[in-house]
Image: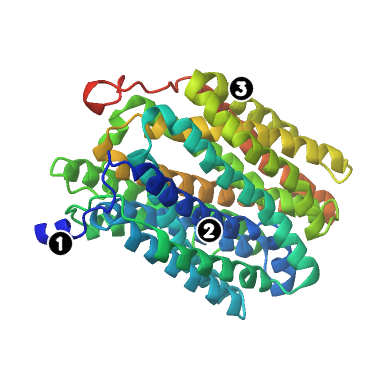
């Protein structure tokens, strides 16, 4: 991008002008609505996995790719958003993201089988991958430090209410219509958000030249893809055998990740890194990143097991499963603004530590589920889990992004998003793999189908319980960043 092009794309909003506050609120509001749409799409599928397994005649290890491929694509694309957020202005990158997402939703709605459905989910994921870093970077740019907790609380509403009503809407649709109507429902909302953003959103960033290292993009794809595919192969091998040993893609992923990290470190000295790993030099950001990664492994892994458990073990339908998940999600939405204001007042520790402890306790309790577990206990456990997560995510987002200087915001949000999605995909793959292996072993030991599946699900939740202990330990080290002179976070 030339200097002239950069000047032509200068932001339409300049800090300090009287009407900036209203315009900034409008931009953030549109981004929040649009992010709500893409989050709704991500969770509306959660109760559909068992339904699609029966309707399309596929195993759990194949059906999980509807979620895993989505998260994996996001993990590969999100690093590139750091580049996009520097090169493009707010309005064109928003329109690009929502247009791609709408196209993917249309492909899913018209898909005749699993293969094209997964392909449509991949296209959706490309658009979704851009939205969250765009929202986070915009908020960090426009909102002063003393008000970020409240704004991040509003983001938490989006991140909790969409997951709350997504399964319920998905359950209602599956109870009365074909599964394709989940996408027919989302498509007009996505197109509406695109039209609204095209007409009302304003540019609030200043594009600058940023190089794109193609080799880094390729290495990141092999790194993240190899690790998640290897974990997924464990589940496939347990059910029907796998042509490629699981350790092969895992090894490829580990080697590619090592080379990727080495290249980013070298390129960061020339300001050419795809992901500037100098953000990890800020200790508070790194600790928050670790907690976020572990939380996503436990959360996404358990989120795919709960619908399988409620429908295939307890015998509930999709609508009942959605209703079970609704109270906890709505509680997270109600807690978002409260937790945000409390963060601005007391910092992360009094909120984060009790939150992760609650999450860990629920994960351990889920290792005891069986076909005789009362439904009220499942609802109570999910509500407690949601309360713990409400205390967790807002402090993590605010403390992590507030711990790096402004020039690194786009890289920090891209790294945070990449880690979230890779950890979530790894969690799903790991939990399904452990469930499949244990279910197969239990069946060979003479247990009936439901008893064998329940044993497998308990083993999957045990993975989350063990991992959650590490999350509690890491959360002890997260602190509230303090602004130092010059805008640099203190204590980095």
Mark 1 neighbour class, 10 Å CA radius: few under 14, some 14 to 19, many 20 or more? few
The residue depicted at 78 percent of the width and 51 percent of the height is 323
- Residue 490 vs residue 315, the one in the foreground: 490
Q: Nearer the viewer, mark 3 or mark 1?
A: 1
Q: CA distance from mark 3 to mark 1?
A: 50 Å
Q: How is the image coloured?
A: rainbow
Q: CA distance from mark 3 to mark 2?
A: 30 Å
- Residue 174 vs residue 72, the one in the foreground: 174
- Residue 468 vs residue 130, the one in the foreground: 130
Q: Which residue is mark 2?
A: 38
The residue depicted at 38 percent of the width and 58 percent of the height is 77
Can you tell which quarter of the image residue 113 is in?
A: bottom right
For residue 5, which numbered disc appears in the image? 1
The residue depicted at 43 percent of the width and 62 percent of the height is 197
Q: Is residue 8 left or right of 391 when viewed as pictured?
A: left
Q: CA distance from mark 2 to mark 1?
A: 31 Å
Residue 482: percent from left, percent from top = 35, 21
User: Sequence-wise, which precedes: disc 3 or disc 1?
Assistant: 1
User: Sequence-wise, which precedes: disc 2 or disc 1?
Assistant: 1
Question: Does residue 128 sit above or below 151 in this rendering?
Answer: below
Q: Which residue is mark 3?
A: 354
Q: Please report contact status of discs 2 and 1: CB closer than 8 Å, yes or no.
A: no
Q: Nearer the viewer, mark 3 or mark 2?
A: 2
Say which element carries label 3: helix
């Amino acid at each position: 991008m030339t200097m002239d092009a950069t000047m032509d794309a200068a932001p339409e909003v300049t800090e300090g002008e009287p009407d900036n506050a209203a315009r900034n609120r409008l931009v953030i509001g549109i981004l929040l609505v649009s992010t709500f749409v893409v989050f709704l799409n991500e969770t509306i599928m959660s109760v559909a996995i068992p339904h699609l397994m029966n309707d399309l005649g596929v195993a759990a290890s194949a059906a999980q790719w509807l979620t895993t491929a989505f998260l994996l694509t996001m993990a590969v694309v999100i690093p590139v958003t750091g580049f996009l957020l520097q090169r493009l202005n707010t309005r064109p990158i928003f329109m690009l993201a929502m247009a791609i997402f709408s196209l993917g939703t249309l492909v899913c709605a018209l898909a005749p089988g699993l293969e094209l459905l997964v392909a449509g989910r991949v296209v959706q994921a490309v658009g979704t991958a851009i939205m969250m870093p765009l929202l986070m970077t915009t908020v960090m740019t426009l909102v002063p430090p003393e008000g970020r907790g409240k704004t991040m609380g509003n983001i938490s509403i989006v991140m909790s209410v969409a997951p709350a009503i997504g399964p319920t809407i998905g359950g209602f649709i599956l109870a009365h219509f074909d599964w394709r109507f989940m996408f027919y429902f989302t498509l007009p909302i996505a197109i509406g958000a695109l039209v609204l953003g095209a007409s009302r959103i304003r540019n609030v960033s200043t594009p600058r030249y940023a190089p794109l290292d193609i080799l880094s993009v390729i290495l990141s794809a092999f790194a993240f893809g190899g690790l998640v595919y290897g974990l997924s192969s464990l589940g496939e091998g347990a059910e029907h055998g796998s042509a490629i040993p699981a350790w092969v893609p895992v090894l490829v992923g580990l080697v590619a990740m090592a080379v990727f990290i080495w290249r980013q470190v070298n390129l960061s000295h020339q300001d050419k890194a795809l992901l500037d790993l100098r953000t990890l030099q800020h200790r508070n950001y790194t600790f928050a990143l670790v907690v976020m990664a572990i939380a996503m492994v436990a959360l996404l892994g358990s989120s795919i097991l709960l619908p399988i458990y409620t429908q295939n073990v307890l015998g509930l339908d999709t609508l009942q499963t959605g209703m079970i998940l609704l109270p906890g999600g709505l509680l997270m939405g109600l807690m978002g603004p409260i937790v945000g204001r409390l963060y601005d007042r007391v910092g992360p520790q009094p909120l984060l530590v009790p939150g992760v402890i609650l999450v860990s306790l629920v994960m351990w309790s889920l290792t005891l589920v069986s076909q005789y577990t009362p439904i009220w206990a499942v609802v109570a456990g999910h509500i407690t889990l949601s309360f713990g997560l409400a205390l967790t995510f807002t402090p993590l987002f605010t403390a992590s992004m507030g711990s790096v200087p402004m020039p690194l915001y786009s890289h920090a949000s891209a790294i945070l998003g990449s880690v979230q999605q890779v950890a979530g995909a790894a969690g799903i793959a790991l939990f399904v793999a452990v469930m499949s292996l244990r279910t197969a072993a239990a069946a060979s030991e003479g247990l009936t189908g439901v008893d064998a599946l329940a044993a497998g699900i308990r083993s999957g939740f045990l993975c989350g319980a063990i991992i959650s202990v590490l999350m509690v330990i890491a959360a002890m080290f997260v602190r509230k960043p303090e602004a130092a002179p010059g805008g640099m976070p203190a204590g980095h």
